[in-house]
Image (spheres, grey):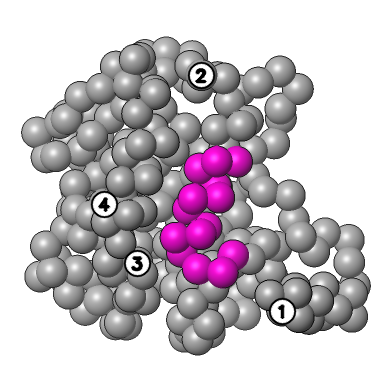
Amino acid sequence: MNDIYNYIISELKPYEKYGSIVQENGTKLIGKAPHIAPLAWLHSIYKGLEISEIREIESKLDIELPKDYSEFLKLCNGLKLFNTTLSLNGRRTSYDRKSEINARQPFDLSTKNIYERPKNTNSEHFFFGSYFGDGSLVLIDKSTNKVIRTDRNKFRVLNSWTNFNEFLKQEIIRLKKLHNEDGTLKNGIDNTTPKSEFKNKGFWNNLKSIINKRNSR
């Protein structure tokens, strides 16, 4: 799992030319983004958690975290890419807006796993992130280890990835292509969420697409 952390740091390093600081709570901020707001940053990487803190999350959610995400949390307590274009959630201990400026924290995992859980989900669905553009969510299906993007209010497969690491790598690459080197959106880009794999398809076409993908592996 250290490989994915090193990959994140490597891919975001070019933005350090626009500034980089480590806050008092260990949050690493990369790339000032005055085009968004005076105190905005392009990327936020939150300090990894101790095993005891991960166990607290599991106790609060009353689940066992997927192994991939549990290992990720040891390295990063969530992160935000291109401000909040893509956010991965973690353990949040304060909602004090004033202290947040000097000790930024991730969105909390409990929000979508407990309080705002979409309809038609099951116990195998672990929600860990979201896209700002349309509010869609990403989850790990613990029965398959796949990552799925779904509507925010009702479970519906929009995109899928083989596993968490592949999801994060592919999305970092995709999002970088949509932005200029200073983090501003490229001309003509008005949608930063992934294009749905299943848009405007009926049930049988969706099923056929999934089967074809499996057979091609």
Foreground: disc 2 or disc 1: 1
In the rendered structure, which segment of residues is drawn in magenta?
A: 161-174
Disc 2 to disc 1, how far (Cα)? Answer: 36 Å
Q: Residue at coordinates 47% horizontally, 53% vertically from top-left?
A: 168
Q: Split into 4 quadrants, where in the image is the C terminus?
A: bottom right
Badge 2 or badge 3: first in the primary sequence: 3
Foreground: disc 3 or disc 1: 1
In this view, 217 is above or below 19: below
> Badges 4 and 3: C-beta atoms under 8 Å apart?
no
- Residue 41 at what x, y percent from top left? 36, 25
Q: Residue at coordinates 88% horizontally, 61% vertically from top-left?
A: 200
In this view, 22 is above or below 164: above
**Dot 3: few (<14), some (14–19), or many (≥20) neighbours within 10 Å?**
many
Dot 2 corresponds to which residue? 181
Dot 4 corresponds to which residue? 76
Residue placed most toward the observer, 121 or 64: 64
- Residue 98 at what x, y percent from top left? 20, 30
Report the amino acid beneath label 4.
Cys
In this view, 193 is above or below 217: above
Query: Label 3's element?
Result: helix
Q: Residue at coordinates 39% horizontally, 23% vertically from top-left?
A: 14
Residue placed most toward the observer, 168 or 45: 168
- Residue 51 tag number: none
